[in-house]
Image (cartoon, grey):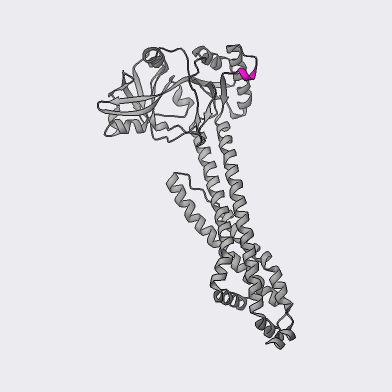
Amino acid sequence: MLNYLRIALRSLAAHKLRSILAMLGVFLGTLALTGVIHVSEALKEQARIETEKLGPNLLVVLAGKPTFRRSGSLRYGGQTTTFKLEDAEALLANNPFVKQGTPFVTKNSTISYRRNTINSQLIAANADFPAVRAAPVAIGHFFTKQDVRQRAKVCILGFTVASKLFTHHTQAIGKIVQYNFTNLRVIGVMPKRGSDLAGTDQDEQVFVPITTYMRRMSNQDWVSGVFMTLYTDKDEEAAKQSAIAIMRRQHNITRKTDEDFLVLSPKDVSELKTQALQLVWLLGLMSSSISFSVGAMGVLSIMILLVQTRKLEIGVRRAIGARRSAIMSQFLLESSLLSGIGGTLGALVALIIITIVYYAAGYPYVYKPALIAGASIGSCLLGVVAGAYPAWVASNVDVLDVLRDK
């Protein structure tokens, strides 16, 4: 076997350029397949992590209809003013599958401290927000139910907001910041949380009591939606139908087309992103299939060439007693080695590229050893298939004809 391997390596080394060109298709196919699948799996894992960030067993009822940006992120709330605080109270009181929840209002505006001014997103909610959205405070504390009742002028800053307004985020506690000409005392700072599944940077948010915002800061009677925690994720579909029924009753709606709200779970957004990833995965699979086909043709062509140029060697080996099976095994080994080297190199280069992508984009590091091993083994099998015909031709070379010609 080692002798066969030495002969195979010597033969491939004698035709370096042709061997490299034959490997190229398999190399690109393995590179594309390994890269696309790994990045797709990393994005799925990121979506799962972001789903967990939104809170356990979360269900959201939004005012109006959300729109999706090209990046896949979700923009919700809009300018719909038909979602009243009474609707939120009805949802929380009458949905038997809801454990707890909070109405909320979102608004993009600026927040300032002395000469520092930055853009941020205001979230006005009740004191239950940290439990509903799994959002504990890192420094200080969240506002209390008493703060909500008293319409206290207090706020909690997201990590990025606190870091930009102050020299260090820990200096924010107790300071007075200005939000839309309203002075608010900082009582807490959130930890780093990153972007959620909807594409919102949670570190650029500012949290205030919902009563403070609706009565002291804007004088409005409508909300952007309701965050609700279910008792168990098994109740999700039933909870959705119950929420739809309650909102239709509240708004006197009979037709689905007239609905001015949307009931959404993190799983729904995750599924939309997964559908987009499936398209990317399909395109990657198609491109890798084309590359594999080109690679197989390359291996086939160079193996036929090798058979033609080595007829004398084959004839001599047959003349001194080599069996046809030995000749066939020799050429199958060469074709599988040719293809296997290309596939293994493609998988290794793909690992380097996806690691760089993970680092640059902040994706979770997801690796599939079985896929990498399978790509290498599959490349070898591709070489066996592509080299089967040339190996058969080599094993059937007529010894007398070769010696007579030479």
Task: Farthest residue to the front: give it.
Answer: 405
Identify the image quadrant of the N terminus.
Answer: bottom right
Residue 376, above or below 156: below
Q: How many marks?
A: 0
Task: Farthest residue to the left: give it.
Answer: 114
**In the image, residue 365 lies at what x, y percent?**
48, 48
**In the image, residue 191 lies at what x, y percent?**
38, 33
Residue at the spot x=60%, y=38% of the render? 275
Residue at the spot x=60%, y=52% of the render? 287
**Left or right placement of residue 160 versus residue 79 in this view:** left
Q: What span is colored magenta in the figure?
A: 255-259
Identify the image quadrant of the C terminus.
Answer: bottom right
**In the image, residue 134 lies at what x, y percent?**
47, 29
Residue at the spot x=61%, y=12% of the render? 249
Identify the image quadrant of residue 93. top right
Magenta stretch encompasses residue 168: no
Residue 309, above or below 379: below
Residue 151, above or below 194: above
Majority SS type along the magenta span: helix
Looking at this view, is 95 or 38 the one in front?
A: 38
Q: Is residue 320 visible?
A: no
**In the image, residue 212 lies at what x, y percent?**
38, 15
Identify the image quadrant of residue 152. top left
